[in-house]
Amino acid sequence: MNLNIALLPGDGIGPEVTQQAVKILNAIAEKYNHNFKYTKAAIGAAAMKINGDPLPNETLKICSEADAILFGSIGEPVHDHDPNANIRPEQGLLRLRKELDLFANIRPVQTYESSLHKSNLKEEVVKGTDFVIYRELTSGIYFGEKKISKNEQEATDTCTYSAKEIDRITHLAFKAAKSRRKKLTLIDKANVLATSRLWRKRVQEISKSYPSIQLNFLYANTAAMQLILKPTQFDVILTENLIGDILSDEASVISGSIGLLASASIGEKTALFEPIHGSFPKAKGKNIANPLASILSAAMLLDHFQLYDEAEEIRAAVEKSIELNITTPDLNATNYFSTTNVGNFLSDFIL
Amino acid sequence: MNLNIALLPGDGIGPEVTQQAVKILNAIAEKYNHNFKYTKAAIGAAAMKINGDPLPNETLKICSEADAILFGSIGEPVHDHDPNANIRPEQGLLRLRKELDLFANIRPVQTYESSLHKSNLKEEVVKGTDFVIYRELTSGIYFGEKKISKNEQEATDTCTYSAKEIDRITHLAFKAAKSRRKKLTLIDKANVLATSRLWRKRVQEISKSYPSIQLNFLYANTAAMQLILKPTQFDVILTENLIGDILSDEASVISGSIGLLASASIGEKTALFEPIHGSFPKAKGKNIANPLASILSAAMLLDHFQLYDEAEEIRAAVEKSIELNITTPDLNATNYFSTTNVGNFLSDFIL
Ligand SMILES: CC(C)[C@H](C(=O)O)[C@@H](O)C(=O)O
Ligand SMILES: CC(C)[C@H](C(=O)O)[C@@H](O)C(=O)O
């Protein structure tokens, strides 16, 4: 298969981990006779350093022409210290999502035996957790009209959802549930919000086409409790943008393996793959960042193109490296390997 | 002191636990020579059974004339099974908040040595947690304009905040921080929302009047992680309505003592006190519901009228009952006491 991949390393440890993901993709390409081509582009704080724009036109063009995007991470401390800054690195990411219509953010939350003990939750609570969150990513209050009155006495955000926007991600989530444990939980605030009531209506309607799937509803506040009280109860979670932002980050701490969690943001035309950990500026340039989440994001990229065997091969290699303790300091405090060496091990293992 | 207390037992276990709280308030009144008068009123599903209205005018009148409101809980399963129901018990509570302008929801999250092991989080993570959440309760997306288009193809919710609405709860939160560990964390989505940016502006401005308080900002998604990763880092949390709804319920599972968590909803004219646990229909009528959260809500009521010694006396009694294992099945599986007997013990202990 020929794939044109846009490479957006971004800020912090982004470049280091992305480099290892490319190494692994290259190993897969060699072994399976694929042809992966990469085009690098700037985004976030790194792009702002060049011409002030967190999403340069050039980058947007490269991304729109690519089959898929491999994304590192975004954000630099200097921009966080000024909460009133008008342009922020994150805006690059938000605009990219919108322009490319990456409407479905998909986040699997799984556990790895060897890192269970790293969770702040008790092992018996966490063990067996295996769910995936479908978060709507290009609408809702993120992209509605925003106003601040001239005298700064009032501000307004608007949250709008159309049936079409709800339907397309809902179908994806139901399809995912079909190939999993056949349970879908819609999380909303239907006891308060009109948009949530539209979500419930559409999702109930669409559920008729998926009779094998058990559909449940949960309020966002109750879900925030249940994720900690009984994470194993979930299979596929479907939710809107802001609630999804909060709950998917909450969910990322359950398994104790935040350095192992990958994500995909899917559109009709292209898709973006990124580790869920942030830019982790303190680790930048030290060759200690865990590349596994980025590498597992590359596996999700292969899944997206139905290269399931190849994706499986990456996952098997990752599990092997964890089993053998060939991991970075976050998983392996005493006898750790560098970012590069973890990548090398995986690449050798595959080839 | 003379206090006129509106009593809103509500649904599920609400009536049982409220009865014990009244018993304890009576013990305090007797010992300290206060005069507490109670006026009972219907709300929620219980009120809907009478004339379909979850907040009858009569109830609203009683509440507006009262010095304070002691609230049980709201919600009945029959209403949860129909997500499209137009009138729901919760609307009674939402309208009550709005009509009485109960703008500040205050939720202390503390740990009790004896129930630490009940937490799904590890004991060493949870130990020493002691923070309080100030959630804005009468504005934001809860009370903005709501629209569903005729053909049900689009829905909109509106989130508006005025400087005035932000300022009044912000002052309360800063004052709380002054008498605590002097740290205030504003939680928002200022990287996305205009209303959040107004919150940051106002809170930064107001912080100048409280120079002894250390002010921090956290995005809601990051906060959802940090609450689990390091709950002891928080002192006073300040946030808007929807984010506060989600995060305060998330926070309620940290300590493992959800049956012990109380809350206050404060307005200029009156205030409402309620346990944070819900109506727990399965336990209804069995005399097994834990009355301690309702009793601790009564202690918050006394605090509100500066009856600090009296409130302290209740808290000491509660701690004694926990220490001696004179508790309901949720805290004491083998040798438990009934709701009524826990109330009796506390009342005797005080008198
Ligand atoms: C960086 C920020 C704007 C973004 C969001 O809020 O969506 C982030 O939290 C995420 O989830 O990718
Ligand atoms: C019952 C519901 C409307 C309410 C809310 O969303 O505010 C509840 O979750 C709460 O926190 O008191």
Image (cartoon, coloured by chain):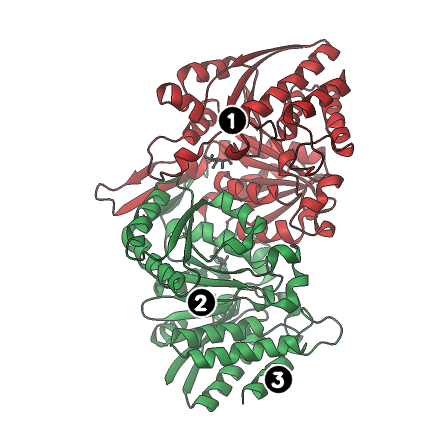
Chain colours: A green, B red
Q: Residue at x 41, y 88 (%)?
A: A34
Indicate whether A78 appears above or below B258: below
Indicate whether B82 appears above or below A46: above
Say which of marks 1 and 3 sits in front.
3
A68 displayed left or right of A9: left
Spatial separation of the CA atoms under disc 2 and disc 3: 25 Å
Indicate whether A338 appears above or below B334: below
Question: Mark 1 — residue?
Answer: B102
Q: Residue at x 75, y 18 (%)?
A: B348
Instruction: Please tell me which of labels 2 and 3 falls first in the chain.
Output: 2
Say which of marks 1 and 2 sits in front.
2
Q: Amino acid at mark 1?
A: Leu
Quarter assignment of residue A255: bottom right
What is the x, y in percent for residue A335? 74, 76
What is the x, y in percent for residue B123? 72, 49
Q: Amino acid at mark 3?
A: Phe
Q: Are marks 2 and 3 on the same chain?
A: yes
B108 displayed left or right of B141: right
Spatial separation of the CA atoms under disc 1 and disc 3: 60 Å
SS label for mark 2: strand
Marker disc for residue A264: 2
Classed neighbour count for the residue bearing mark 2: other residues with Cα under 10 Å, few (<14), some (14–19), many (≥20): many
Contact between labelled residues 3 and 2, with CB atoms less than 8 Å apart: no
Residue situated in front as seen by the camera: A93 or B247: B247
Marker disc for residue B248: none
Chain of the residue where label 3 is placed in the rendered structure: A
**The C terminus of chain B - image quarter:** top right
Classed neighbour count for the residue bearing mark 1: other residues with Cα under 10 Å, few (<14), some (14–19), many (≥20): many
Indicate whether B97 appears above or below B347: below
**The N terminus of chain B - image quarter:** top right
Q: Amino acid at mark 2?
A: Ala
Does the beta carbon of the residue at mark 2 sit less than 8 Å from ligand 1?
no
